[in-house]
Image (tube, rainbow, N blue to C red):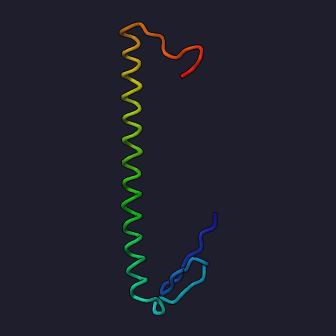
Amino acid sequence: MEQNTIPDGYWEDARGCLIPVEQIKEIDKARDELVREKVAKAKAMQTQLRQLKLELMGDIAAFVELSAERYGAKLGGDKGN
């Protein structure tokens, strides 16, 4: 994947056009900053949730295996589920 570098003093719009920073309204700059901040927080939360899910699934799998060993239960079956 090719990544273009945006020259200093320009922003890239949704169509890929370069816009001089001085032509961008202050409210648009503030909106961009807010969105980038919130997206960064959401991505950090996504990483935490992924780690939690992996931990929980591992713990539950270990518990099911321990329970099966303790009570001599057979895991799985001919019909599935």
Residue 64 falls in image quadrant? top left
Residue at 41%, 64% in the rendered image: 39
Above or below 18: residue 44:
above
In this view, the residue farthest toward the right is 1
Residue at 57%, 76% in the rendered image: 14
Residue 81: % across, % down: 53, 22
Above or below 70: residue 25:
below
Residue at 41%, 52% in the rendered image: 46
Residue 19: % across, % down: 54, 87
In this view, the residue farthest toward the bottom is 22
Residue at 56%, 76% in the rendered image: 5
Residue 55 falls in image quadrant? top left
Residue 15: % across, % down: 61, 78
Above or below 34: residue 51:
above
Is 43 left or right of 12, judged from the image as shown? Answer: left
In this view, the residue farthest toward the top is 72
Above or below 64: residue 23:
below
Quadrant that contains the N terminus: bottom right
The number of callouts visible is: 0
- The foreground one among 21 and 70 is 70
Residue 71: % across, % down: 37, 8
Is 12 left or right of 25, judged from the image as shown? Answer: right
- The foreground one among 30 and 77 is 77
